[in-house]
Amino acid sequence: MIETSSFFFSIQTVYFYTEVKNPCLMKETLHIYTRVSTTIQETDGTSLKTQKETGIELSKKLNMNHQIHNEGGSSSSKDTLDNRPVLLNILKLMDDGIIKNLYVWNTDRLSRNQITWYTIRQVMVKNGVVLYTSNGKHETTDFMENMILGILSEVSQYDNQVRMERSRLGKIEKVKLNYWRGGDCTFGYGLNWDGTGNKLVENEGESKWVRFLFTEYSNGTSLKIVKGILEDNGIKTRRGNEKWSMGSLQVILRNETYLGYDQFVDKKTKLTIRNTVPQLISNKLWEECQQRRKLMLMRKNQINRTSKFYLFRDFLVCKCGTPMGGRVKTNKGIQHYYCPLQERKFNNSYKENIKCDMKRCLNIPSTDTFLWNKIIDILSDTIELKKKLKERTLIGKKFKSKDLKYEIQSREEQIRELTKTKGDLEKGLVEVETNKFTHKYPSEEIYHSLRKELTKQYNHTKLLIEDIRNSIRQIGTQERWFDWIESFGNYISNQREVPDTLWICRPN
């Protein structure tokens, strides 16, 4: 017995031709095609094993040799010949007159798709192939048997559609009860079985790295550096890979699940269900990261092309609103910041409705020196910094301990009111989704408009609650800032020299 796969088509074909042309081989061969619909069944192996053993047993009863063709796990959701290389090779061998007897567990192992199944049947009829299944023998050249095969195919397809619909409805019911829909959960979370289903819970071993990623990214650390740190610490991706891709990190940065709610959208009905899950990062940190992502996307054409480090390029914006670019050609004495609007328009019709009359460039060394010294001057003026700090802190208002206690109580009351508002907004979002599902809105635009506005108010309320809680934590510790400002001012006043990393390559 020789087992074949898609990697050994050429060897397989040589074997078949040798078998057919060798007059010493008297027995016919029963070709056994095995396939399961999911990789889970393939890993488990039971279904494949059953198909294989049943086929071998049948070959013995028929006094035939046997040949195994294992397709492994192949999803029936995309039931075409494009993702079935072993079956394609079988059809080729049928056309070559090599395969005359084929066994499959059931006709749906070949295909549940009407067009694909018709193609396969046409090849079998054309070449007089006898098909064996667990239901018996089918002479494809007999018009009655051919009709029966067609009926069996229709039944298999109907059964598959019913099973898919049951699975879809079952998934929706799970999600409505705040259970996980199935498959891999989001990185940073784990699954906890409560006797009925799995619920998303925080995975503390991963969640700290989610917070690390968001915090470092908001502080300006490049994703390449974060990627290296994750790999150096042996942190694996959700699928167990030791290497992280830049794309997977970007997916985490834009995944709103970390804000404390998981959203499921049914592809067929567009039903949207939002469930509450543990919140891993603050709304404020989320907003900071999204702002940086937005800035990076605006600059992606420059960032992807440049290998230079520019001290202030990411903070300069032309008067037309376009982020400034940087250009350095040391052999020609060129080193300046400039508005790249015109070259972007030329390349990809960027902002065609915007015009810029900025013709001059900024010399990079002079601009960096001027801006750097201005920053040092501002940060060295500790008197002005303390003045601003007093204006923004309770200490500056000279509250007594009794007043501070009253202020804390007042802010806690604000939190209670905002929490109530947040709960009302959550109920409003649920009501909007319910009305959408029961078709109470005359148009999709009304639904999307209401949902967008409620979501905006909900996120804003969460931000306000976070800010007030942070301000309460800061009360009692603000006095330390005054001592720190004095020492920081003394340190920063001695940093007049522009960093000498101005022209080094951007770190990997």
Image: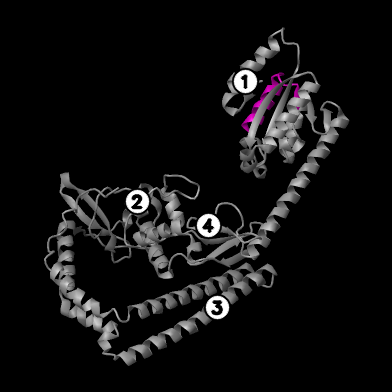
Say whether residue 393 is visible: yes
Where is 262 relative to 7, above or below?
A: below
The mark nearer the N terminus, 3 or 4, is: 4
Q: Position of residue 343 (x, y in %)?
A: 32, 53
Residue holding disc 1: 12
Residue at 80% of width from left, 42% of height from top?
Answer: 154
Foreground label between 2 and 1: 2
From the viewer's perspective, tell me whether residue 261 is left or right of residue 339. Answer: right
Residue holding disc 3: 423
From the viewer's perspective, tell me whether residue 147 is left or right of residue 114. Answer: right
Where is 483 relative to 207, above or below?
A: below
Foreground label between 1 and 4: 4
Secondary element at image label 4: strand
Secondary element at image label 1: helix
Secondary element at image label 3: helix
Q: Please give the label number shown on residue 229.
A: 2
Could you tell me how far apart the alpha carbons at marks 2 and 4 are, in whole angstroms? Answer: 22 Å
Q: Please give the label number shown on residue 190.
A: 4
Could you tell me how far apart the alpha carbons at marks 3 and 4 are, in whole angstroms? Answer: 26 Å
Foreground label between 3 and 4: 4
The mark nearer the N terminus, 1 or 4, is: 1
